[in-house]
């Protein structure tokens, strides 16, 4: 079994390829609609962030200045880790290739095509004029690039993060589905997603949810990091100004579903310090 991420340019047929791969080969598809459903658990607390993330849109300048990007990063990371824990899954967009980068059991795919080809594809699909399609494609390219830059401080087009780059100018949708599936099958034989790896994905998702709870209850500027230790156990590190806040942080984290034990190593200090451990 394998986890596949698909990054795609608008008009390259990447979304269609991912959907057909899931349907024909039995993968679970985590696309915009599925992420939106999964994100409903965050709504009410971070509804603005969920809307931006499901649309892959960067926050406006005002939000960048006054809103912690860690909120965005933790929401999307929690959803991607939860998707990866499901295994045999195709994760479309949302920067999944950067969150799961470097893992041998993950196949990172990028689907591209020349801009003129993408404009023609989009115009035909939407039934609109070429000029309008060109404006939409160029705006989408800017937004997705800004989205990845804001969340991960990376360039969405950098080739080193991808294991497979498919240019649909010459590669048909059928060929692309077959190529991705055959590569994923071989990868699965070499580097399977084991029960231990699935557990690590679940633990990472739980930690991200815990950090979101801390942001909600204690403010986004709190300097607490939640790290996985073992199944159901997490470690808290960082600093807080009072002992009361240190205890509150632990109680907040204990309330998160899936967390049973907390190793609290938060340092009480008025200023950032380097912990002794």
Image (cartoon, helix red, strand yellow):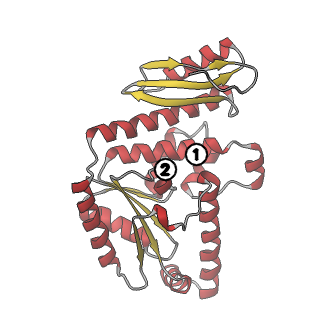
Residue 21, above or below 248: below
Q: Quadrant of the C terminus?
A: top right
Q: Which residue is mark 1?
A: 73
- SS under mark 2: helix
Kindly identify the residue that appears in the image at 61 percent across and 36 percent down. Answer: 45
Residue picked out by circle 2: 99
Pick the front one: 135 or 220: 220
Q: Is residue 7 left or right of residue 137?
A: left
Residue 141, numbered label: none
Q: Residue at x 48, y 59 (%)?
A: 93
Residue 84 shown left or right of residue 222 in the figure? left
Distance from disc 1 to disc 2, alpha carbons, whole Å, reads 10 Å
Which residue appears at 45% of the width and 37% of the height?
A: 204
Q: Residue at x 61, y 64 (%)?
A: 145
Q: Where is 272 relative to 75, above or below?
A: above
69 in relation to 60, above or below: above
Crowdedness near tag 2: few (<14), some (14–19) or many (≥20) residues, C-alpha within 10 Å:
some
Can residue 68 be seen here? yes
The crowding category of the residue bearing disc 1, from other C-alpha atoms within 10 Å (few below 14, some 14 to 19, many at least 20), is some
Task: Give the quadrant of residue 257.
Answer: top left
């Amino acid at each position: 079994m394998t986890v596949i991420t698909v990054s795609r340019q608008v008009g390259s047929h990447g979304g269609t390829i991912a959907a057909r791969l899931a349907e024909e080969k039995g993968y679970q598809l985590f696309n915009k609609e599925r992420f939106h459903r999964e994100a409903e658990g965050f709504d009410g607390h971070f509804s603005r962030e969920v809307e931006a993330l499901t649309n892959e849109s960067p926050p406006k300048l005002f939000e960048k200045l006054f809103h912690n990007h860690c909120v965005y990063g933790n929401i999307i990371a929690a959803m991607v880790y939860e998707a990866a824990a499901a295994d045999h899954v195709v994760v479309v967009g949302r920067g999944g290739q950067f969150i799961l980068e470097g893992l041998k059991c993950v196949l990172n795919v990028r689907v591209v095509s020349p801009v003129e080809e993408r404009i023609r594809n989009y115009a035909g699909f939407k039934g609109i004029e070429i000029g309008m399609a060109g404006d939409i494609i160029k705006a989408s390219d800017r937004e997705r690039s800004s989205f990845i830059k804001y969340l991960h401080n990376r360039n969405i087009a950098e080739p080193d993060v991808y294991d497979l780059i498919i240019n649909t100018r010459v590669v048909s949708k059928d060929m692309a589905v077959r190529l991705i599936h055959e590569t994923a099958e071989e990868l699965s034989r070499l580097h399977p997603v084991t029960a231990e790896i699935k557990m690590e994905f679940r633990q990472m998702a739980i930690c991200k949810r815990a950090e979101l709870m801390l942001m909600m209850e204690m403010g986004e500027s709190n300097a607490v990091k939640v790290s996985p230790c073992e199944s159901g156990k997490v470690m808290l590190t960082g600093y807080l100004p009072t002992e009361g806040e240190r205890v509150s942080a632990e109680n907040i984290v204990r309330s998160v579903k899936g967390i049973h034990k907390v190793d609290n190593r938060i340092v009480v200090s008025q200023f950032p310090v380097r912990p002794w451990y």
